[in-house]
């Protein structure tokens, strides 16, 4: 059994992807900017800053980074603070890992101002040894270095760590970094199910399906 479990946040621990996606799509639509059909897959691993830079520099959104951040926050902060719920099977699975003496960690592209209040409201913030945003590393989840940096901070080898994510790019990148990977179903990644299943060591629709040990 692995000793260390690292979880993505949006779409993996909590059912937030519709809100996360809308904070991006709403800005693009309001600005009348065209975007690729797989825009959410592209920007999900980038974090808010990387997403804002992609929207401005690649897609041509005619706003400053500060204006993009402000509009994202206006839409999303209240949802994370008051609305978003934990996904099916997550609480029970985390409790099982804690009882087995495993360490739990979060590695998310979302900023602390979104993540921390949501985890606290759900009563699981203190269950994690570390809650990290990609901002803490200055890297994105499409870079293998962030996963190696995380396990180094924890003090384990990559072969001792399991990483959970609903995003194809993140799963592929963590696998290349040497972590055991679990792909988690989310409706936002419906069209990538087979690709995620192929990239991951395990694939589940809910965490209730996971075996006792990985």
Image (cartoon, rainbow, N blue to C red):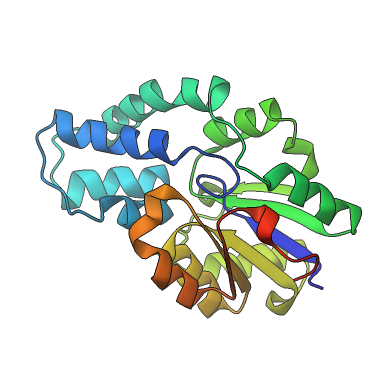
Residue at position x 37%, y 23% from top?
75
Quarter location, residue 122: top right
Quarter of the figure with the N terminus: bottom right
User: Is residue 41 shown above or below 114?
Assistant: below
Quadrant in the rendering for residue 36: bottom left
203 relative to 52 in the view: left or right: right
Tell me where residue 214 appears, x and y as whole percent.
Answer: 75, 71
Depth check: give the residue in front, 45 or 50: 45
Q: Who is closer to the viewer here, 187 or 23?
A: 187
Where residue 15 sits in the image (x, y, percent)?
A: 52, 39
Residue 178 vertical placement versus 32 (above, below): below
Look at 62% across and 48% down and name the residue there: 132
Count of all numbered marks drawn on residues in the image: 0
Q: Residue at x 75, y 74 (%)?
A: 160
Q: Nearer the viewer, residue 144 or 127?
A: 127
Where residue 123 appears, x then y in whole percent? Answer: 75, 30
The location of residue 44, given as percent across then percent down, is: 39, 51
- Asked if residue 129 can be seen in this view, the reply is no
Q: With 27 as the anchor, is 170 left or right in this view?
A: right
Tell me if 44 is positioned left or right of 3 in this view: left
Please say whether residue 157 is visible from this viewpoint: yes
Task: Between residue 30 and residue 88, name the one nearer to us.
Answer: 88
72 horizontally vs 131: left or right? left
The residue shown at (68%, 46%) is 90
């Amino acid at each position: 059994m692995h000793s260390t479990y690292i979880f993505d946040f949006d779409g993996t621990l909590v059912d937030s992807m519709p809100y996360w996606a809308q904070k991006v799509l709403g800005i693009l639509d309001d600005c009348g900017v065209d975007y690729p059909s797989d825009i959410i897959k592209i920007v999900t691993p980038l974090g808010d800053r990387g997403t804002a830079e992609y929207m401005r520099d690649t897609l041509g959104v005619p706003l400053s980074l500060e204006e993009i951040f402000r509009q994202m926050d206006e839409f999303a902060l209240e949802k994370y603070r008051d609305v978003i719920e934990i996904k099916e099977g997550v609480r029970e699975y985390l409790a099982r890992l804690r009882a087995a003496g495993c360490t739990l960690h979060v590695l998310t592209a979302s900023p602390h101002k979104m993540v921390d209040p949501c985890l606290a409201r759900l009563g699981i913030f203190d269950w994690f040894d570390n809650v990290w945003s990609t901002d803490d590393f200055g890297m994105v989840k499409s870079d293998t270095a962030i996963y190696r940096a995380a396990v180094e901070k924890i003090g384990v080898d990559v072969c001792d760590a399991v990483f959970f994510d609903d995003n194809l790019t993140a799963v592929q990148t963590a696998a290349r970094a040497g972590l055991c990977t679990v792909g988690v179903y989310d409706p936002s990644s419906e069209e990538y199910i087979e690709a995620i299943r192929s990239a991951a060591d395990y694939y589940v629709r809910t965490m209730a399906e996971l075996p006792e040990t990985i």
